[in-house]
Amino acid sequence: MAIKEEIAKRRTFGIISHPDAGKTTLTEKLLLFGGAIQTAGAVKSNKIKMHARSDWMEIEKQRGISVATSVMGFNYDGMKINLLDTPGHQDFAEDTYRTLSAVDSVIMVIDCVKGVEIQTEKLMEVCRMRNTPVLCFINKLDREGRDPYDLLDEIEAKLDIKVRPLSWPISMGKTFKGVYSLFSKSLHLFVPSKSKIESDGLNIDDINDPRIDKEVGVNDAAQLREDVELIEGVYPEFNVQDYLDGKVAPVFFGSAVNNFGVKELLDSFIKLAPPPKARETEERVITPDESKFSGFVFKIHANMDPNHRNRIAFIRICSGKFERGKTYHHVRADKKIRFSNVTAFMAQEKELVDEAWPGDIVGLYDTGNLKIGDTLSEGEKGIYKGIPSFSPEIFKEVVNKDAMKTKQLEKGLSQLMEEGVAQLFTYELGSRKVVGTVGALQFEVIQHRLKHEYGASCDFMSMNLYKACWISSKDRKKLNEFVASKQRHIAKDKDGKLVFMAESRSWLTMVQDNFPEIEFHFTSEF
Ligand code: G4P
């Protein structure tokens, strides 16, 4: 019974947004409610600003911050909440995608002035791949933003998800009065304040209640009634299952910096958001309440101290109880493995833990046995699905600058790739090594870290490549023929999977037409 209770009270989620929409601010306010921090300003943004591109101190500092804020656990209203941080900078999108594999739902923050921005669109695509439930928070209502109906239409159109407002703003910007919660039938009055802790609001079941006129004025009260009538008429009644299936995003309005609408969001979130659910391995579906432990690695963080090679592997627990010191099965390596140094992430502190439950994230100190995507279990043989690599956008060939340090370079590259900093493709012909990334920043990070942590130096030579496509075919012979005929363009990824390195979109289309028996995939999981 204990395990069922532990699962029921866990909510593991991530916040996604375009940079500057207010993710860091919202995170901080949520932690304030959870009592995990006492003062505003305690959460450091892990944004790497563009002007800091070559500022290595900055990068190193960010790595430090990103360990500290990778997972923030806190208790709220009898629930155990695990908030997983996602890097805001688009060059680290791959890291964000992987982190999203470890959450059960997300909160999406949208700036009411800017509306849906490009990074939100990309992140939403990832959520849609897994049907992750999305709850939307429209932020910065203290500013003159766009019309709320327009914003909702834009979310539906650009993010391809239905929306259902569960709260509604009363005016906006300078005349912003507050929100009416359609979900909890309560009126929340806006008082700008960065430090105040929000109260529960006025319980108002009937929208015609004259108290609304008294609180917000006759005109705004009339507008609110009109809006509520319109919403109830236009949008279908909110269906929790549709939200859980990732089909409808409930929408809340507020102002994170003013600590407004955040409590309402959190209270609604714990009622609506799903507890840990069943997950699929290559062999079967595993439910969280199964007695045997299983989990997977979604992030690896290298030690900040270059003299110590140990790393922290972040494990999402999917089933059973995880116990420190117990021997588990490392599925990919097919060997036994035991961890005595296990940390949990409560507030912004790391603390030693003895046990953890489905939905929890633990950090395991590892000396190089684990890599991203690995599964740990109590004997189960299947590897958890859902942590694919995506085709990178930028490709560069690695040129060794110091022949005496070839070994160091290879080791460094391989370890950085295991951490998921970038992807490495090795050409079948000539063993040329190509690093692929989503953004340009990673190349600088790799060069810097190779030098400082491994004593190796390399250059990167630009390559004219469009995509890396993982290839497969039902017909083994056809696949071999294809590989033989396109040998110059065939490489292997870190797991030895075959990849076709396409030079241009048009050429890829032509090759696809010419080889209909070959399947081309843009992610490593198919
Ligand atoms: P991010 O993590 O999504 O990138 O965004 P972050 O929270 O850092 O917020 C970006 C900027 O938006 C910050 O201002 C923050 O104070 C502001 N902000 C957040 N919520 C609100 C809100 O509800 N209303 C208004 N008006 N502003 C909001 P900044 O000037 O970049 O930083 P700071 O000097 O205020 O820290």
Image (cartoon, grey):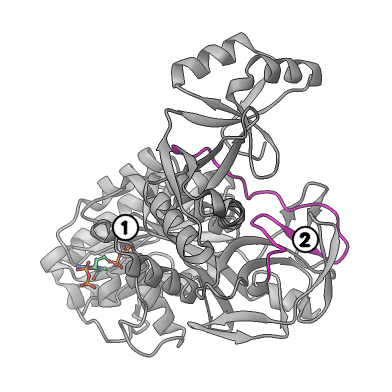
Residue at 69 percent across and 44 percent down: it is: 495
Q: 118 or 58: nearer the eye?
A: 58
Amino acid beneath label 1: Pro
Q: 266 or 503: nearer the eye?
A: 503
Give the number of the mark in front: 2 or 1: 1
Q: Is residue 448 above or below residue 5?
A: above
Q: Which residue is mark 2?
A: 287
- Does mark 2's beta carbon lie closer than 8 Å to ligand 1? no
The N terminus, quarter of image: bottom right
Determine the image quadrant of residue 170.
Answer: bottom left
Residue 19 is labelled as 1
Q: State yes or no: residue 364 in magenta.
A: no
Disc 2 element: loop
Q: Is residue 223 above or below residue 33?
A: above
Ligand 1 is located in which of the four quadrants? bottom left
* Stretch in magenta: 367-395
For mark 2, does the 10 Å Cα neighbourhood hold few (<14), some (14 to 19), or many (20 or more) residues? some
Q: Is residue 357 above or below residue 197?
A: above
Q: Position of residue 355 (x, y in %)?
A: 73, 82
